[in-house]
Amino acid sequence: MGLDGLNEYWKACCYLSAGMIYLQDNPLLKEPLRPEHIKNRLLGHWGASPGLSFVYVHANRVIIKYDLDCIFIAGPGHGAPGVIAPAYLEGTLSELYPEFTLNEDGMRRLFRAFSFPGGFGSHCTPELPGSIQEGGELGYSLAHAYGAVFDNPDLIAVTVVGDGEAETGPLATAWHSNKFLNLARDGAVLPVLLLNGYKINNPTVLARIEDEELSSLFRGYGYEPRIVSDADQMGAHESMAEAMDWAAERILALREEARAKRQAQRARLPLIILREPKGWTAPKKIKDSHLEGYWRAHQVPLPEVKTDPESLRVLEDWLRSYQPERLFTKEGALREDLRCLAPEGEKRMSANPQANAGGRRHALMLPNPEKFSVKVELKGATVAGNTKPLGHFLKEVMRLNPTSFRLFGPDETKSNRLDAVFEFGKAWMAKTLPEDADEGFLSPTGRTMEYLSEHTVEGWLEGYLLTGRYGLLSTYEGFAPIISSMVNQFGKWLDISSDVHWRLPIPSLNLLLTSVVWRQDHNGFTHQDPGFINAIVDKWPSVVRLYFPPDANSLLWTVWRAFQTSDRINIIVIDKQRHPQYLDADEAFNHVTKGLGIWDFASVHPQEEPDVVIASCGDVPTKEAKCAVEILREYFPDLRIRFVNVVNLFTLVPSGEHPDGLTDREFDSYFTKDRPIIFNFHGYPWLIHRLAYRRTNHKNLHVRGYRENRKIGMEAAYLVPFLKGRGGITTPMQLAIINQIDRFSVAMDVIDRVEKLATKASFYKDRIKDQQIEALAYAYEHGVDHPNYAE
Amino acid sequence: MGLDGLNEYWKACCYLSAGMIYLQDNPLLKEPLRPEHIKNRLLGHWGASPGLSFVYVHANRVIIKYDLDCIFIAGPGHGAPGVIAPAYLEGTLSELYPEFTLNEDGMRRLFRAFSFPGGFGSHCTPELPGSIQEGGELGYSLAHAYGAVFDNPDLIAVTVVGDGEAETGPLATAWHSNKFLNLARDGAVLPVLLLNGYKINNPTVLARIEDEELSSLFRGYGYEPRIVSDADQMGAHESMAEAMDWAAERILALREEARAKRQAQRARLPLIILREPKGWTAPKKIKDSHLEGYWRAHQVPLPEVKTDPESLRVLEDWLRSYQPERLFTKEGALREDLRCLAPEGEKRMSANPQANAGGRRHALMLPNPEKFSVKVELKGATVAGNTKPLGHFLKEVMRLNPTSFRLFGPDETKSNRLDAVFEFGKAWMAKTLPEDADEGFLSPTGRTMEYLSEHTVEGWLEGYLLTGRYGLLSTYEGFAPIISSMVNQFGKWLDISSDVHWRLPIPSLNLLLTSVVWRQDHNGFTHQDPGFINAIVDKWPSVVRLYFPPDANSLLWTVWRAFQTSDRINIIVIDKQRHPQYLDADEAFNHVTKGLGIWDFASVHPQEEPDVVIASCGDVPTKEAKCAVEILREYFPDLRIRFVNVVNLFTLVPSGEHPDGLTDREFDSYFTKDRPIIFNFHGYPWLIHRLAYRRTNHKNLHVRGYRENRKIGMEAAYLVPFLKGRGGITTPMQLAIINQIDRFSVAMDVIDRVEKLATKASFYKDRIKDQQIEALAYAYEHGVDHPNYAE
């Protein structure tokens, strides 16, 4: 069967897409179309659907012809009908959702279920088999595609990039992912730029530049582009078939070459630019307005069909133009001779196990973190880099899992002190120079992926996880907000997908936020931002976890645990610099497992009921809080202080609201029912109130943390003269004092809040205040902290 | 004076840059270098500094030669020394900061002030004259540059794009800004891609592809690229001077052509690719490690100089290699014959008034919003589109301010119902087709700027504001988080710049968030996100304002007020659909001015002390809350209900924490000291607790809002069977009920919380619950809400 059959298969897809948008009954148009056959509310988008189906059916053709292993990634927004249609026709839908039988009745149900409460959405949501990219928020298709094919040598991700999507930043920079793809070990991406010319209400930029400029752009991106652009449909089929053959053969040849050669080389992957009319196959005009090939075809092209007989007539003509009676049997099944145009079993893109967590869960081999732990001679006095041991741990994870674990980051792996992993190289397929052999060598087989687009590395990691492999992304805390919307969209995917009965769990997204807000000594104000956690803390409790390990060993166990979870977003916040160490390996394991704990070694008279609770969360605030205890111990040896450290932030939430939340009884057992609590927190102080405001002792909770409102509301007015350069360049101690998370402020808070200290309060407070001002003044004069306060 | 002089001027910049990083004394090296001359802490980045100065001095040359009007935009991170140095040499620094005199003493002070607490930061912060782009978070330089030159016909933004920065998404897509630039009315951008080859720890992608590929990429982006790449420094000067002459002449010729012609045409702007070694002019190697031309030159190349005599010797040799005694007079001033190499007065890029809010504040001409207001026949019964009148208002703003106001958005102006502005066209310089004459026509002089990169349009607007003009950006609420980090960085700029004594205030950043979370009927879960406000609410109280106008007229006054503010970020959240209208023009003015108000018309027995307060914030929650009052009035006619509507969210915060905050007495006068408050909120409910947790009556505050944790903690267990497709495709009423902001849930909340209703509570609650379930069931069956609940 030649391209005529393919055209008919495609027309069947187009018919189904239109049916999903308009019809709730009379699915095969056996009767004349009447208003009651039309849905009450017309939702969905026609614009990109025919183009998506077009690429899909042509991919089917080459899958069969060359026996390829492909997944389909739909970039354009709202194109779901164009992908649901072939998934239905090739039978996957009814295998997973028995109600969508391949007959008239199933078709009616499918039409009705689309864009209907409880049914399929208008993007490629997790409920749609074969999908690993929803596309509600545009821009991530290409990065997802590359992530999916890394270490997946046989896979080809046929990736349709919308020309609207192509205008987004994340997509524009993801084209360069080809500098990190090694065909000798990785699969390939076949990008199809769908140039349908319009967004919601505007032409797209790439559709309105000359062909030569367009080709030049993609050659500059390192691809070999070919433009498919034919006015008539059969011509388009011919050109597209030819282009797909060329692309498939090119990929196979490049792959063979890469695997035969000993010297890996960057491949110029083929890229197809498909110029087709927006809303292809819709009526050309309705009344006096352009439709096919214009932005009006973006959404529902004929919104008045239920009420306007003229529109209804146009719709009926349009639907009948596909000749459903020719495409489908009387019973509503696809015509038998067309069925062989789709591949079978797992070769169907809608049933490819790669798009369902890679088909089965491969456990990650994990070394024992104890082997990498820091020896803590004296709690709080031993000093070590917090992240360095993790680098050694991750290196071992790489050794044990040579094809299923990668480390991702924008360009900060070394800065974040994880550079032990460089023993396995950094992935790099562009040109190299002799000096690249220096530490952290670039290699075609490197396991660390660095590219200065947070969006792209996050997208790579998501694609890698969605196909069942493991990873961790480390980034500066201050720049994590760059990807907060992207992580948010991934969280939405996880929240839904973990409830889809046939979806396998995927390894969790692990984000290490380091170079934290408190240590931006030379980076200044722009690098200070603990806001990422605020953007994520309100989200799905089944998905999000927030960890603030206080030291190197607790970080090791936190990551070890995170790697064993599924369908989660684990956010781990810790600084990269040298800091006091508190817990040996065993203690760290227990502390991380419980999520919080009372530290007797940092408490005073720990066996007695406390006068006050000093709590901390985050490494820098923990250090300052602990030093505050030392100050208080010296001045008020009788004061009973309980020291609580929190690793898992969600322990603070009531147990009914988060699976990790403590019961009220448990919470009270740590924080008491009536003693003052001074809580020294890593981020914005409000966050602790937001988590704990229902707790018994909330009225006594006093939180310190990072504050942006230093111009007003400064409680310690005597600090104001020091607010020069406000947060620009600061020493660590200055920044702590300005935000009042420093040892002195915490100690003074305690004195203010414990009644029995009232008589001696002002005397000792003045002494502490003097020390604080002295520390501040020293830093302003010398540009460094006094040696007493360093590390 | 030829290029030799320029080279020496540049060397003086390099010397000063190195001095800023290392020296606290002995600035002219009059004595042998000793450890005490070295700063205690070495901070700052050498890598990009020499390249930045190189471009700066070459820009100076063409400014003088062609009498150009230029500003300098530094994209690379941490390059401040390379920009501070020429600003100091040309005298601007000492004009604004008298301590930095142009002599030995001033130089010592400058060296010490750099990257020192209270001094200059290592980015081009607001304290640096001539800067409109800090560059701490990378990627925004090019969008800022284009924004600055729109409607600025004489201006040329010399824009250095770092090759690290070029890997970010926002930068990668901003290249296409040239499709929106009309040289007939706009200035020009001269991009210089600084290809120094390295980021922190990796080569850059663009430095490791072939020259031909690189040129092809930029031709594809629509530029005319020229590569400057010379091994020796004088050769580089010659090539750069030639390239700058070519670029300047090309821009002037294109400009002249554009202004002479009647037919506007997209211009291929010149672009210079400057390939130079990272850390140019630093030692080639130190010990066995590569330095100049390698990533090790990124930050402080010789970190051990204070303690290691060998390093100190290398540093001294390096510093003396610039021959400071030749470049500077004995007194420390730049050699007299070099001074003429910088332009004078406002031609100096560091003193160009364009980079300081355009030099002076041009007031925006504003029409009276009353002219555009909706006539409210019956409060709550009159229905109108909330944003449509604003479109007409904005159209009038465009008419009154033809060269100082633009509207920005990704592609949603029409979708957001602001399309009345299209009378003035949409800016577009790429190809046009006959059908573009359809509504919303594309035009070289269009005043609406649409491009599907939220980053780019936000960057354009920022650049436009920073040069003293006005604008508004409208975007879907659900996708505003894409730019939350960018808005955050802009807020940091405003927070600092508004305190810099010589900076003029700039017009505020106005963001209209519409197509809100509650009306995603066909877009589904991915489009539901009220999280942007959470990412910004914790920030600088002097900068951020959050408004939730309840209807069309209050939106008009909110925008009218926002346009009259400076140095702020005004975030305005309102839906675009048809909704009930409550306030006539006068009432809306008063309501918006106060920021909140008691609505007697929506209250029951308003003249009496209330039994309960029902509060609302946001249009959809207000509608539902008001309908709840109707239900309660019917069942409990004696119940005294006070209805409070909040427009300005920060009124809820104590007055000590935010300038718009109410005093506790004021707050109590609205919300009472002891009555139950049911607060129906637009966003995450926690936010209201976070703002109001210190208020007297907080214990009685019960908040409803958007919730992500629908899987657990669902209070209304009887709703669980309806949680199909959880938030995917929903009708408005379904989404309200699922999140319990619907009229029924609010009414039941009131019944639960008002003691005097206890006796009849269960009877009426059951009736309400039945109505609620009926509404939900109807929507699931018909795919639309029952007509009773629509609009």
Image (spheres, coloured by chain):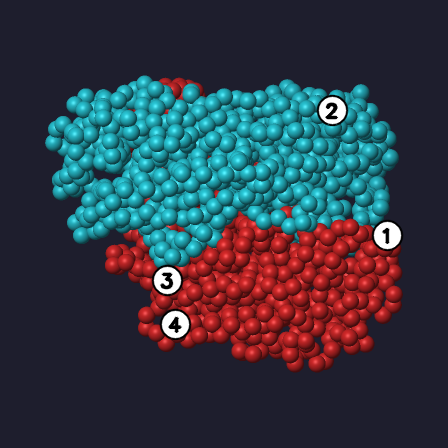
Chain colours: A red, B cyan
Q: How far apart are marks 1 and 4 (CA)?
A: 60 Å
Q: Foreground: A243 or A332?
A: A243
Q: Mark 1 lies on which chain?
A: A
Q: What element carries label 3?
A: loop
Please tell me which residue is depicted at 81% across the width and 29% down the height of the picture. B376
Marker disc for residue A258: 4
Q: Which chain carries label 4?
A: A
Q: Name the residue under label 3.
A: A429
Residue B39 can be seen, yes or no: no
Q: Mark 2 lies on which chain?
A: B
Q: Mark 1 points at which residue?
A: A307
Q: Percent from the top left, x then y, of residue A577? A: 33, 44
The amino acid type, in three-letter code, at marker 2 is Glu
* Quarter-of-image position of residue A49: bottom right
The amino acid type, in three-letter code, at marker 1 is Thr
| Discs 3 and 4 lie in a common subunit | yes
| Discs 1 and 3 lie in a common subunit | yes
Q: Is residue A751 above or below residue A359?
A: above
Q: In this view, does B350 lie above or below B732?
A: above
* Quarter-of-image position of residue B370: top right
* Quarter-of-image position of residue B604: top right
Marker disc for residue B370: 2
Q: Percent from the top left, x then y, of residue A133? A: 57, 59
The amino acid type, in three-letter code, at marker 3 is Met
Instruction: Say few, some or many: other residues with alpha carbon within 10 Å of mark 3 (under 14 / 14 to 19 / 20 or more).
Output: many
Q: Mark 3 lies on which chain?
A: A
Q: Distance between the residues labelled 1 and 2?
A: 36 Å
Instruction: Say few, some or many: other residues with alpha carbon within 10 Å of mark 2 (under 14 / 14 to 19 / 20 or more).
Output: some
In this view, the residue farthest toward the left is: B32
Q: Distance between the residues labelled 1 and 3?
A: 59 Å
Q: How far apart are marks 2 and 4 (CA)?
A: 70 Å
Q: Distance between the residues labelled 3 and 2?
A: 62 Å
